[in-house]
Amino acid sequence: MEIEVTSEELTKIRKDKREIEARFRDLEGLERTLRILKLRFLIEQREKLEKRLVEMRTSYIELSEFEETAKRDKEFFMAFRKELSEENKRLRSELEATKK
């Protein structure tokens, strides 16, 4: 397990070195320290998960918006294609009429 501490926390740890060493000699102090470390670890994990959840929500919203845009674009192009097809059909029939 890896523990990350800020420079302020490192300064405090160095300052309170004797107290920390006494805690490690004392079983109750050790258990207290382990609970604190576990709690800090869990808090960090929760913060990472919350950040990831925000990112996923943002990505989902962007994907949903993209999907809606794609649907509208498809409808537009299908209508445009239909118009072109009808115009092409009309022009062919006019061309056939002029050939006769």
Image: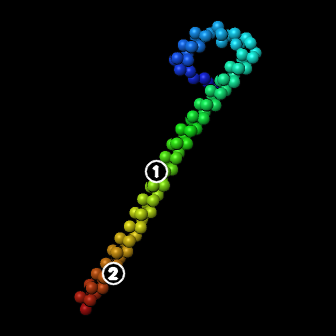
Q: Closest to the observer: 31 or 56?
A: 31
Amino acid under label 2?
Lys
Q: Quadrant of the C terminus?
A: bottom left
Disc 1 versus disc 2: distance between alpha carbons?
Answer: 40 Å
In the image, residue 47 sits, relative to residue 5, either above or below, namely below
* x 60%, y 33%: residue: 45
Q: Secondary structure at mark 1?
A: helix
Q: Is residue 98 left or right of residue 89?
A: left
Q: Residues within 10 Å of mark 1 (few under 14, many from 20)?
A: few
The percent position of residue 89, horizontal first and vertical second, equals: 33, 81
Q: Residues within 10 Å of mark 2 (few under 14, many from 20)?
A: few
The percent position of residue 66, horizontal first and vertical second, equals: 44, 55
Q: Closest to the observer: 36 or 80?
A: 36
Q: Is residue 74 left or right of residue 60?
A: left
Q: Which residue is mark 1?
A: 62
The percent position of residue 69, horizontal first and vertical second, equals: 42, 59
Q: Quadrant of the N terminus?
A: top right
Amino acid under label 1?
Glu
Outermost residue toward the bottom in this view: 100
Mark positioned earlier in the residue sequence (1 or 2): 1
Q: Which residue is mark 2?
A: 89
